[in-house]
Each structure stands twice: as structure tokens, then as C-alpha cells.
């Protein structure tokens, strides 16, 4: 079993809200009978779930699998993961003890990263690192909480002398996108994948030939559908507040992965740039 083939059950749970009614019907059957499903043919699953075979194929593709066979392998990988039964999200109570608060928030952040790792495609990460490393310019797009993730990425890329600019609203994003050229990159961050301003901005960048990379919640969404390279995160909490927190941690983890990959592609240059910026900041504080 390929150790990387996991995330079938996490992917279904994360994408549930974006599924069609018939896709949701088979998804719910899979979640209720995962051990049984890994041994079924697409014909048998269609019979048991009372859906068409085409629905199962569509669900597999919605979950970014090549077909039902890959989905089954990912479900089997989840079932073989020894922590599967214990690594679940905890509801955060505001009336509990401080110890419970510390443990619950920390636990949910850890699980969010673990779930994201099961959904993050190494091939897509490799393509994203290559595109970002080769880009003349990088536009980093994020609105609201996603703008903070973009700001973190900008700070990291700037330290290793990579040209980048943030668009935290439509006007700024459209201005950046309008001046991008083929080979440049726009990196769109939107947890929901539904942000209208982001969609319009990415369309402008795509029209100009820029490589579009997106970081969104796992599943089918309009922002990811515009991407040349799709990256996904996952959080499954019931609480809106805890979801916003854990999704940010998962996104920052992906940003760190990309940053280290880019720096590694230009190792000597990156080390020198980091030293240059460190010395410049140190001198500025000394003379300030």
C-alpha cells in the first residue's frame, strides 16, 4: 500500500457541503460502511447506495481521484492508519477549564495539519514550488483572514529576494493581475473557494497567461477550478470559530512547505539573501 494514498474519508467529510444530492447519498453510504466499500466494485456500490455508476465516477473526480479504484485505495489507507479512531476534532467549550481550552485548541490544530497532509498532493506541491521558483513576479491574493496568510508568505519570499506583491482586495488584485505576463504566478488563497473578488482577479491573471495556483478547502469550488495547480487544506470542526483558527494553521503549514521548497531550489542565493536582510535589519535598529 502506498503510504501517501490516504485522505479518502477526510476528503469526503470535508467536501460534503459541496456535493450534489446524489453524490452526497453515495458519500454518506461510504462513511457509514468504509470497510465494506473497499471490497466493492463500482457496480455493487451503485446498487447498495441506490445511485448510478456515473454518480460514483463523478464523486471520485470531485474528490480529485482518477477514478473509483483510487478512492478505494485512499479509504483503505485511512482505515489502516492506526490513529484514525482517536484523531478527531474536539468541540471547544468557552465554559470549560483553561487546561481544556489549551488542549482542545492545540489538538484541533494538530489534527487539521494531519488531515491536510492526507489531502495534499506531492505532485501538485512540486509543481507549485517549480512555478514559484521560476516566476519573474508573484501576486499573492487573499481577502480577510486569507490576507494574513498572504502577508506571511510575502514576508518569507521577500527574505529570500523573490519579487512578490499582495492584493488584499479586488482593486489591488486586479491591478497586479493586469500587469502579469506568461510565466508569472498568481497565488490565490481562499478557504471557502467562493470569494467573488478572488474569482474575478484570477480570471484576469489567467487571461494574461500567468500560472494560477490556489490554496482552498478540499472539494469542488470556483476558485480551485480556475487553477493550473490546486492545493488543498482540510478542517472538519463543527464550530465556525474553531474552523477559522484551524484552517489558518493548516494554510500556514502549506506556506511553510512551499517556502522551504523554493529556498531549497536556490539554496546558496537564499542563504545569502537571508543574511543580507538580517544584517540590514540589525543595522537599521542600531542606527535608529
Image (cartoon, helix red, strand yellow):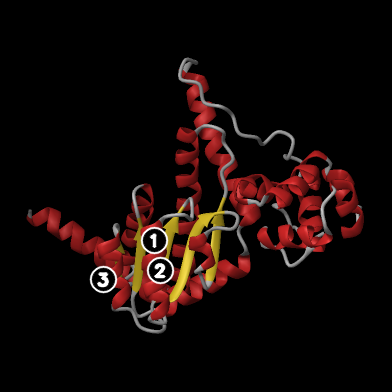
Q: Distance between the residues labelled 2 and 1?
A: 6 Å
* Label 3 Cα crowd, 10 Å radius (few <14 / some 14-19 / many 20+): some
Residue 134 percent location from the top left of the image: 43, 80
- Residue 202's label in the rendered image is 2
Indicate left or right for 183 with 284 as reference.
right
Callout 3: SS? helix
- Is any part of residue 2 visible from this angle? no
Which quadrant is home to the N terminus?
A: bottom right
| Residue name at image x 64 percent, y 46 percent | 16
Residues at badges 2 and 1 in contact (C-beta under 8 Å)?
yes
Q: Quadrant of residue 120?
A: bottom right
Residue 175 coordinates in the image, percent (x, y): 26, 71
Label drawn at residue 198: 1
Q: Which mark is residue 98?
A: none
Crowd around label 1: few <14 · some 14–19 · many ≥20 (10 Å) = many
Q: Which of 2 and 140 is in front in this view?
A: 140
Relative horizontal placement of residue 217, taking residue 30 as reference (left or right) = left
Image x and y of residue 255, in percent: 45, 58
Which residue is at 40% across, 68% downward?
202
Secondary structure, mark 1, is helix
Amino acid at each position: 500500500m502506498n503510504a501517501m494514498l490516504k485522505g479518502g474519508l477526510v476528503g469526503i467529510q470535508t467536501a460534503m457541503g459541496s456535493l450534489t444530492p446524489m453524490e452526497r447519498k453515495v458519500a454518506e453510504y461510504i462513511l457509514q460502511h468504509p470497510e465494506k466499500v473497499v471490497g466493492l466494485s463500482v457496480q455493487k456500490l451503485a446498487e447498495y447506495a441506490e445511485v448510478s455508476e456515473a454518480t460514483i465516477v463523478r464523486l471520485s473526480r470531485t474528490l480529485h481521484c482518477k477514478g473509483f479504484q483510487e478512492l478505494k485505495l485512499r479509504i483503505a489507507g485511512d482505515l489502516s492508519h492506526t490513529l484514525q479512531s482517536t484523531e478527531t476534532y474536539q468541540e471547544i467549550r468557552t465554559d470549560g477549564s483553561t487546561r481544556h481550552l489549551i488542549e482542545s485548541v492545540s489538538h484541533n490544530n494538530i489534527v487539521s495539519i494531519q488531515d491536510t497532509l492526507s489531502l495534499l498532493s506531492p505532485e501538485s506541491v512540486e509543481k507549485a514550488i517549480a512555478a514559484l521558483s521560476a516566476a519573474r513576479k508573484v501576486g499573492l491574493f487573499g481577502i480577510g483572514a486569507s490576507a494574513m496568510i498572504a502577508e506571511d508568505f510575502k514576508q518569507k519570499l521577500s527574505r529570500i529576494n523573490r519579487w512578490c506583491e499582495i492584493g488584499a482586495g479586488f482593486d489591488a488584485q486586479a491591478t497586479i493581475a493586469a500587469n502579469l505576463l506568461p510565466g508569472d504566478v498568481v497565488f490565490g488563497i481562499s478557504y471557502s473557494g467562493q470569494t467573488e473578488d478572488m474569482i474575478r482577479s484570477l480570471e484576469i491573471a489567467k487571461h494574461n497567461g500567468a500560472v494560477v495556483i490556489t490554496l482552498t478547502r478540499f472539494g469542488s469550488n470556483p476558485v480551485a477550478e480556475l487553477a493550473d495547480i490546486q492545493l488543498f487544506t482540510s478542517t472538519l470542526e463543527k464550530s465556525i470559530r474553531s474552523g477559522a483558527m484551524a484552517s489558518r494553521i493548516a494554510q500556514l503549514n502549506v506556506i511553510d512547505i512551499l517556502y522551504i521548497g523554493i529556498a531549497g531550489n536556490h539554496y546558496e542565493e537564499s542563504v545569502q539573501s537571508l543574511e543580507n536582510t538580517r544584517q540590514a535589519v540589525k543595522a537599521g535598529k542600531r542606527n535608529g
